[in-house]
Amino acid sequence: MPDKDLYAIGWEKLKEIDGAAGERVIEALKDIAPDLARYTIEFPFGEIYSRPGLDLKSREIATVAALTALGNAVAQLKVHIHGALNVGCSRQEIVEIMIQMAVYAGFPSALNGIFAAKEVFAERDVNELD
Amino acid sequence: MPDKDLYAIGWEKLKEIDGAAGERVIEALKDIAPDLARYTIEFPFGEIYSRPGLDLKSREIATVAALTALGNAVAQLKVHIHGALNVGCSRQEIVEIMIQMAVYAGFPSALNGIFAAKEVFAERDVNELD
Amino acid sequence: MPDKDLYAIGWEKLKEIDGAAGERVIEALKDIAPDLARYTIEFPFGEIYSRPGLDLKSREIATVAALTALGNAVAQLKVHIHGALNVGCSRQEIVEIMIQMAVYAGFPSALNGIFAAKEVFAERDVNELD
Amino acid sequence: MPDKDLYAIGWEKLKEIDGAAGERVIEALKDIAPDLARYTIEFPFGEIYSRPGLDLKSREIATVAALTALGNAVAQLKVHIHGALNVGCSRQEIVEIMIQMAVYAGFPSALNGIFAAKEVFAERDVNELD
Amino acid sequence: MPDKDLYAIGWEKLKEIDGAAGERVIEALKDIAPDLARYTIEFPFGEIYSRPGLDLKSREIATVAALTALGNAVAQLKVHIHGALNVGCSRQEIVEIMIQMAVYAGFPSALNGIFAAKEVFAERDVNELD
Amino acid sequence: MPDKDLYAIGWEKLKEIDGAAGERVIEALKDIAPDLARYTIEFPFGEIYSRPGLDLKSREIATVAALTALGNAVAQLKVHIHGALNVGCSRQEIVEIMIQMAVYAGFPSALNGIFAAKEVFAERDVNELD
């Protein structure tokens, strides 16, 4: 019994932030764990990213920083580098976040963050995105 | 042979961001590891936080998010909640970052982030800071 | 605009599983982050623990194992040791989970898990709980 | 001077739980670290999984939950998804564990757990295993 | 059915390395998880620290570095700072390991490592140990 | 305004320790984050590895142990297995560190460390290095 409005709001927010990269994650969940797809749409996107109190660009800065520091979710980090760029971060700002993570999670996390960003930037060059 | 300018720049930046909480960390290092005190001033503050390309408020959002997600450095998290508030974050923005970390690092990390923020806000109430 | 039913279902489930320890967490959130209190009730308890497909005892085994392995959320681990005991785990089963985590997260995580269990068992002895 | 009985008990237990996937891990250790192969057989399997006090299915639930939450050992997670299925978990129960880990380790860990399960389920379909 | 020789060898090795701090850990396990006490003596100390191929001082350097980097087991880190000093590390070498961890696990881990060392050094001053 | 001497010292130290594997990391950073390349040379290598107080072999033992325990930076771990061998560790000593990490970070971390070492040893066999 999903809350239809929360789902609809979340789906729009997911497309706004993560774009095609986010839609592919949801698609990949459909056959094995459709409820996890629904929760991903409803909770992070329907609830959290839809909250006032912190702008979307700042929210994506927080997410990119956290995933870079944790260092164990490179696929999701790449989706959110796309997300950060989609909501107004510049490529240089992404690079700055990665460099800063050397201080809080060590140089290997920063390096792996940079290499993830490099791949995302190359994908976006092919697709003529900022 | 420390770089005197980098040290001076870093010391000013540390005081600007972390205030008295940051100064106490440096003081506590003096007798046991004075070079780690110097590195802390020179590298994170003299170099990283002094870089253009990402504003200080966004940098503190990244740091608070990362330390909340990692969940193993509560003392440093509290210093940087002070830091974030000192450079322009509102208390509500701090709370929003913590709530968002439930998505990326789980509810326990978010709860522990909130409880750290609660302590910092209480300290600041006593000292009549925002 | 919370979903009233989800909240009510979650609140009952939280009380069933975590008992007074869980209620205290929600209470502590009320003044600083009431929406995180609501999300905690609605998502983990209203949605996840209310799902069929895995019995509650198995769900608490999974949670206790994960929090012991992560090792950075001792307060929440203690709440869920209570929870596991409340839904049918024996004290010996809790101890077995902790010992097993030595294999997957190292002996320090196992030791810290055991010491958390020891505190919970002592609290329950005082309150004459299993 | 290995304890022959412990080794024999552990080897049988490893084959019972992890099957061919576990045997391949041991084989891969033989030339570079034969003692780590021996310890893996003797300690986790000869000692821990052979203990009474927690049934094998519950033990594999704990292991799958912990490895999903840690998020840095996908090869071992896949071996233990096989293991969980081999000792009586259903595929749906595995999926439920993964979804639940979104609460304790964040959505990226849950997603990566689900994608690991998807690969294991596909391997088992090819081999006509449950 | 413990292997008596392994237990005896491990117990001597534990006392050699960790001294009274290690014995207290074992004592604290006796009532709640005596088998974890036995495994701690037999596996890390009876097996691993008793192996040729890497000297004890190097082994303690590895352990102190790892626990500082993980950052979620401060009690065990303190036991092994004692251990490292007991088997030949100087206080300065301990401090150097902590500082170096800033590179691999971030400045907060290094700072927390240093503060743990500071407590251990103070305990040893009281007891007139190096 | 980099400190030229620190950069020059760091570059020599990086080549001494990590050799070609380290130079490739720096090269890969040049187009996207040249300042992170500079920091990597100046801080870890110009400052930390150039410090007296702990010999280079012990420093690499600490780094290999920490990266194996963290388990989320396999590329950097492989660079530092090369580094450890370049500054005097034997292959057997590397294997011993990995096995020991089973105690502090769990068997999966130890296994992944061993498999990283296996790849590095094979690369070195091709290049006729120790």
Image (spheres, coloured by chain):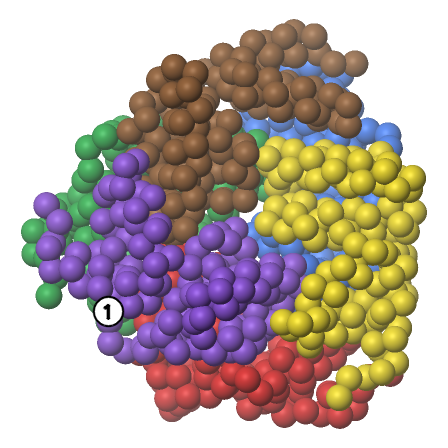
Chain colours: A blue, B yellow, C brown, D green, E purple, F red
The structure residue drawn at horizontal position 18% and vertical position 47%, both measured from the top left corner, is D46
Q: Is residue B78 visible?
A: yes
Q: Position of residue D40 (x, y in %)?
A: 25, 55
Q: Is residue D22 visible?
A: no
The structure residue drawn at horizontal position 81% and vertical position 67%, both measured from the top left corner, is B45
The structure residue drawn at horizontal position 39% and vertical position 27%, both measured from the top left corner, is C121
Quadrant hosting residue F90: bottom left
Q: Position of residue E96 (x, y in %)?
A: 56, 76
Q: How many marks?
A: 1
Q: Is residue D54 above or below residue D14?
A: above
Quadrant hosting residue F112: bottom left
Q: Is residue C49 above or below residue F66?
A: above
Residue carrying label 1? E50
Q: Position of residue E105 (x, y in %)?
A: 59, 63
Looking at the image, which is closer to me, D114 or D126?
D114
Looking at the image, which is closer to me, D85 or D64?
D64
Q: Amino acid at mark 1?
A: Ser
The structure residue drawn at horizontal position 28% and vertical position 62%, both measured from the top left corner, is E14
